[in-house]
Structure formats: structure tokens, C-alpha cells
Amino acid sequence: MRGKKCSDLMTRDLTCCVPEDMVNVVAQSMKAQDVGSMPVLDSQEKKKLIGIVTDRDLALKVVAEGLDSRKTTVKDVMSRKMVVCKLEDDWQLALDAMAKNQLRRIPVVDDQGRIAGIIAQADVATRSDEPEATAKVVEEISKAA
């Protein structure tokens, strides 16, 4: 995979949400698509990445807190601190960031910060022809914090 870019490894066809969306709708969409996270954009038109909402965010910030998912917006529970990579970054940079930060997925943005795709563990496993790299990333991500 030498010379491969993040754009070569990422999943491009993403469903995204905006801060005003209700979390029950986002959770239903995540379930339907069998994904563990959804990028949060400033608007569907501009597509600037401003956060991410994960299944963990929903479990810990909505369910565990007893909030009503039909009355709770994404902006109330989304993660604003994100680790991202850029389209032209070497794929190893993304893998290193995922391992270091124990992330199962990393958003890919263009030079203007607009969402372009996402790299998940499954992308690494299925699109990388280097099983050692995949095993190392999975091991690092899975370590107890």
C-alpha cells in the first residue's frame, strides 16, 4: 500500500447529519445503515465537518442520562473534538492516528474542512493489502484506556 492516500482507503458514500437533527432520527439512520458513527456538518449544503456522533455518544449521553431521544438534538451529544485526516494524506498517517487515539473511525476532509469520507476499521481490513498493519491498528484501538 505504499504511496496510497486516505482517499484510496475511505468510504465515500456517507450519510451525515446537522446539529439540529433529533438523535432518535440519527440513531435510526445509523441502525439502518449499520454504522457506528455519523459525521455532523454545519449544513448539508456547505458540508463543513464540525463534529461526529457515535453510538457510544448516544448510549452514554442520551440513554444513560435518561434523556428523551425525540427531544434531544445532535448538538447536545455530539463530539466536537475530532481527529481527522485529509484526502491527500498518506494512509499510514490515518492508521497511526487511529491507533494512537484508539479510534475505530476517522473522518476524511478536503482542504476546506468539508467531509469527503471516513476510514473505519473495516475499510482498513478490506482495502489494505497489508495484514500486519491492519492487525496492529486493531490491537492498538482495542487496548484498554
Image (cartoon, rainbow, N blue to C red):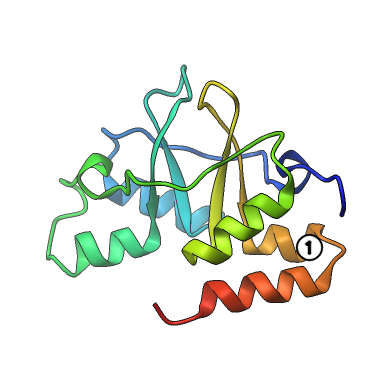
Looking at the picture, tell me which residue is in the foreground, 142 or 123.
Answer: 142
The spot of residue 121 in percent (x, y) is: 63, 63
Height in image: 32 above or below 142?
Answer: above
In the picture as drawn, the residue positioned furthest to the bottom comes out as 144
Residue 34 appears in view: no
**Residue topped by disc 1:** 126
At horizontal 55% and vertical 51% (from top left) the residue drawn is 106
In the picture as drawn, the residue positioned furthest to the top comes out as 45
The quadrant in which the C terminus is found is bottom left
Looking at the picture, tell me which residue is in the foreground, 37 or 68.
Answer: 37
Q: Give the amino acid at mark 1.
A: Thr
The spot of residue 87 in percent (x, y) is: 67, 34
The spot of residue 24 in percent (x, y) is: 29, 51
Res 27 → quadrant: bottom left
SS at mark 1?
helix
Residue 12 located left or right of residue 84: right
Q: Residues within 10 Å of mark 1 (few under 14, many from 20)?
A: few
The quadrant in which the N terminus is found is bottom right
At horizontal 45% and vertical 47% (from top left) the residue drawn is 38
Residue 17 located left or right of residue 121: left
Res 137 → quadrant: bottom right
Residue 60 located left or right of residue 43: left
- Total marks shown come to 1
Height in image: 47 above or below 64?
Answer: above
Height in image: 132 above or below 38?
Answer: below
At horizontal 67% and vertical 39% (from top left) the residue drawn is 12
At horizontal 26% and vertical 33% (from top left) the residue drawn is 20
Residue 70 appears in view: yes
Looking at the picture, tell me which residue is in the foreground, 110 or 29.
Answer: 110
